Image (cartoon, coloured by chain):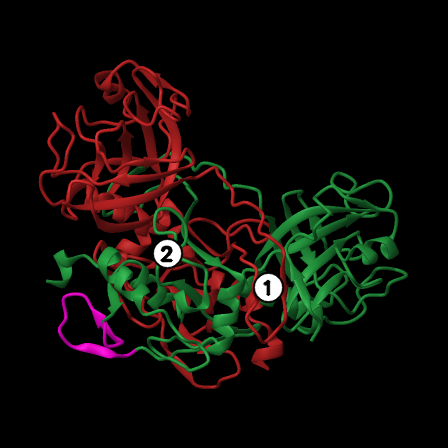
Chain colours: A red, B green
Amino acid sequence: MPKRTYGEIPGFPPGSTFANRTELAKSQVHRPNQGGICGGADGAESIVVSGGYVDDEDYGDEIVYTGQGGNDPSTKRQIADQKLILGNLGLARSQLDGNPVRVIRGAGGDPKHSPTTGLRYDGLFRVVDHWTATGIDGFKIWRYRLVALESADPPPDPIQSDPGKPVSRVETTIQRLVRSTAKAVGVKRLHDYTCQICGVRLITPAGAYAEAAHIRPLGKPHNGPDDADNILCLCPNHHLLFDTGAIYIDSSGQVREIGSNSALGDLRVTSSHPLNWAQFEYHRKHHVSDEKTD
Amino acid sequence: MPKRTYGEIPGFPPGSTFANRTELAKSQVHRPNQGGICGGADGAESIVVSGGYVDDEDYGDEIVYTGQGGNDPSTKRQIADQKLILGNLGLARSQLDGNPVRVIRGAGGDPKHSPTTGLRYDGLFRVVDHWTATGIDGFKIWRYRLVALESADPPPDPIQSDPGKPVSRVETTIQRLVRSTAKAVGVKRLHDYTCQICGVRLITPAGAYAEAAHIRPLGKPHNGPDDADNILCLCPNHHLLFDTGAIYIDSSGQVREIGSNSALGDLRVTSSHPLNWAQFEYHRKHHVSDEKTD
């Protein structure tokens, strides 16, 4: 598989412009000379939005992007169904892995957000959804919703909440933020996306999904290291339970529930992924409350 | 339980200042005349950061906040252990529910980020972590990491990713964004935080946890309604599988896996939570690919 670079290409900040695809390809910001998606089964690193597909929708910080394939380059109309393969699969995989996608806009795209000539790198977006639809031309297309990584969520509206009964005003907030780091993706691959606590392997049409749980958290004030030996491969359910201190790993490597004396079994380990067991002590000390474990 | 307002109080945008706690309480931005946390078992709506606890750390967009209790108001030193009750439990609950917390800074807090006199509302933060520690004075304290809701994540560093082996550069991106809406919290309560697909109920020290899955997604281009009858109460694992189209609900209300002919069982429904079954048709049509279901 090709070597991919997720994230920005040094020397080419957002706003960098390119006269043509050849120049763009040379910069590595978007390597293919033709394709709109630079990606494969392992993920997608960049896309070009240039009006090549009639179903694209560009809202600036938000883009509804059409997958590749099935269209006639000359007329730009869809003439066949698209499939979840190649770059289309790559964008879905990048959604699962949480890898950022470089977005390049070209003349020919929505005039409101596109350069008048040539191409322009417009920064990093994340893929937040992928789905299928019947395109304007009557063929199946894959669609992706991308949101600019820098665009923060707007502050939610106030809501009156009467505990116990549903509340009326709409409010959107970030509920749970799961971070992905480069090393985290490596750890997930070492475990083939299998949860080290329950052994479940979640399969989606775009491939397997797991989350990386830092045993000693990153960031202030824990400042845990982003090293593979400080990372577990967990399913979302056990990631939540581990982070909230509902479960922990004892000094003998057994998974335990707070307030319960029976162990849930051994943590699933593999020789290719050694762990720093001292980090579990930090987790027990700080994230598992003795109010509950006593 | 008190009636809570999560989010901003109309008429008091970030930057609003107050001469004293009485004025602040009158504005409803922070209702208690004394306590640093306005909250209880059902959640916390606001906190005051004013140097009342020696263990507080203020980094501007990020605050490491100390729970309440166990300190001597006159000396501000800890003289007893803190417990996960009252406002301390409320901040943990707000983390689980994804509700925003109003942050008010008062003179006496970190000079770099606090007003010189009186109090100032500094906007909405989200609680991203809670844990225990032994405070400077040797007693157990509860700690909370709050991050400004408006502060976007910085664009990640580029990483060279050789598929198959761990990569070296640190990168952080948002991997999975789970949104919480006011109605969503109501639906979760109707199901007592029990997954409508597998029946699991995740218990954390701060209470039960579940996620709200919009059957027809919110936002462009789906524009699903944020109504209770378009929301399911799911565990994180089944939320992920549902959103990615790995599982779906068929017209007879059975949960099905793509590519499998046997049903996983009936969706768990309750008369107090009627569903708009037409939304499942939208989900099947757009999020479940017939490439996989054929």
Please indicate, yes or no, whether residue B105 appears anywhere in the rendered image. yes
Q: Disc 1 residue type? A: Ser
Tell me the distance, in whole angstroms, between the alpha carbons under discs 1 and 2. 23 Å
Left or right? Give the position of B173 relative to B249.
right
Left or right? Give the position of A44 relative to B50.
left
Left or right? Give the position of B218 relative to A171.
left
User: Which of the two discs, 1 and 2, sits closer to the camera?
Assistant: 2
**For the magenta stretch, what is the residue range?**
B251-266
Chain to which mark 2 belongs? B
Please indicate, yes or no, whether residue B133 appears anywhere in the rendered image. no
In the rendered image, residue B162, in percent from the top left (x then y), is placed at: 25, 40
| Residue at the image point whose x is 78% and y is 61% from the top | B31
Label located before the other in sequence (1 or 2): 1
| Residue at the image point whose x is 84% and y is 59% from the top | B76
Asked if residue A194 is positioned above or below residue A138 in the image, the reply reads below
Which SS class for mark 2?
Answer: loop
In the rendered image, residue A252, in percent from the top left (x then y), is placed at: 42, 74
| Residue at the image point whose x is 82% and y is 54% from the top | B24
How many neighbours does mark 1 have within 10 angstroms: few (below 14), some (14-19), or many (20 or more)? many
Chain to which mark 1 belongs? B
Left or right? Give the position of B173 relative to A84.
right
Quadrant location of residue B214?
Answer: bottom left
| Furthest residue in direction right, as rendered | B74
Which SS class for mark 1?
Answer: helix
| Marker disc for residue B217 | 2
In the rendered image, residue A73, in percent from the top left (x then y), is placed at: 13, 28
Quadrant of image for the N terminus of chain B: bottom right
| Marker disc for residue B240 | none
Q: Is residue B263 magenta?
A: yes
Q: Is residue A212 magenta?
A: no
Residue highlighted by disc 1: B94
Q: Disc 2 residue type? A: Pro
